[in-house]
Image: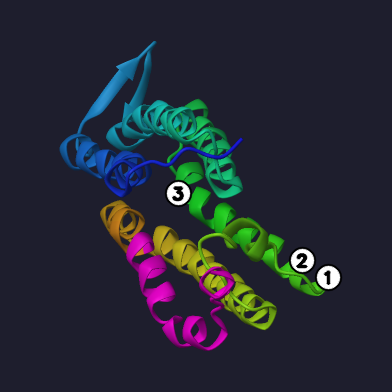
Amino acid sequence: MQDKQATPALRATLEYGPIILFFVAYTFLKDRSFMVAGTEYSGFVAVTAMFIPVLALATLAMWKITGHLSKMQIVTLVLVVGFGGMSIWFNDERFFKMKPTMIYVLFAGILGFGLMRGTSYLEAVMDRALPLERAGWMILTKRLALFFLGLAIANEVIWRSMSTDTWVNFKTFGLPLAMFAFFMTQAGLFKRYGTEEDASEG
């Protein structure tokens, strides 16, 4: 069964819409507090409670539309539910702030484990999107593993030493822009190791 395709605009909406909504909601509610069942919750924790079902619905919509979810999407949802849930349960925003660290450490670890076994798990996930020679996949996987590790360290430094406003801006804009910039800087690798199997077969 072949996966159905979502339009680029719809895919972008489902992937980045929940993050933008989180930013907007935080902007309006960050200075408010909410009393629920005798417990006072900060605006950040309240927004986290809103973000979890929004992300879950967006992920479900992606699956219903395309018939497929990447491992990264599944892991992200599980960690958001887990760490977001702990922030709500313990009324402590630090758990949710640690979530990106856990995601990037996990991804870096998985990619690094594959490299130690002499294989690229990234290739198994992205082969259809980026046709590369094996050597190219190995180099890209190593670079991405180190990049993920760098993002994990950056997240820890920012949430532990800077304001919540700074962290929210970093999460909303900094992380996606960093990912975009990373792949843009790999243009030379794509050009050198890119394959044109489909064109040559015609």
Q: Are marks 1 and 2 in contact (CB under 8 Å)?
A: yes
Q: Nearer the viewer, mark 1 or mark 2?
A: 1
At 54% from the left edge and 57% from the top edge, which residue is drawn?
101
> Which label's residue is closer to the chain start, 3 or 2?
3
Outermost residue toward the right? 117
Q: Nearer the viewer, mark 1 or mark 3?
A: 1
Residue bounds of the magenta highlight: 175-202
| Residue at mark 3 | 97
Residue type at the position of mark 1: Arg
| Residue at mark 1 | 117
Q: Residues within 10 Å of mark 2 (few under 14, many from 20)?
A: some
Q: Is residue 81 left or right of residue 25?
A: right
> Which label's residue is closer to the chain start, 1 or 3?
3
Verify whether residue 120 appears in magenta: no
Task: In the rendered view, tell whether residue 21 sits above or below residue 97.
Answer: above
Say which quadrant the N terminus sits in: top right
Q: Nearer the viewer, mark 3 or mark 2?
A: 2
Verify whether residue 194 appears in magenta: yes
* SS under mark 3: helix
| Chief SS of the magenta region | helix
| Residue at mark 2 | 113
Residue type at the position of mark 3: Lys
Residue 58 rendering spot, x and y as whole percentages: 39, 32
Name the colouring of the figure: rainbow
* SS under mark 2: helix
At 38% from the left edge and 13% from the top edge, which residue is drawn?
38
Residue 32 rendering spot, x and y as whole percentages: 20, 31
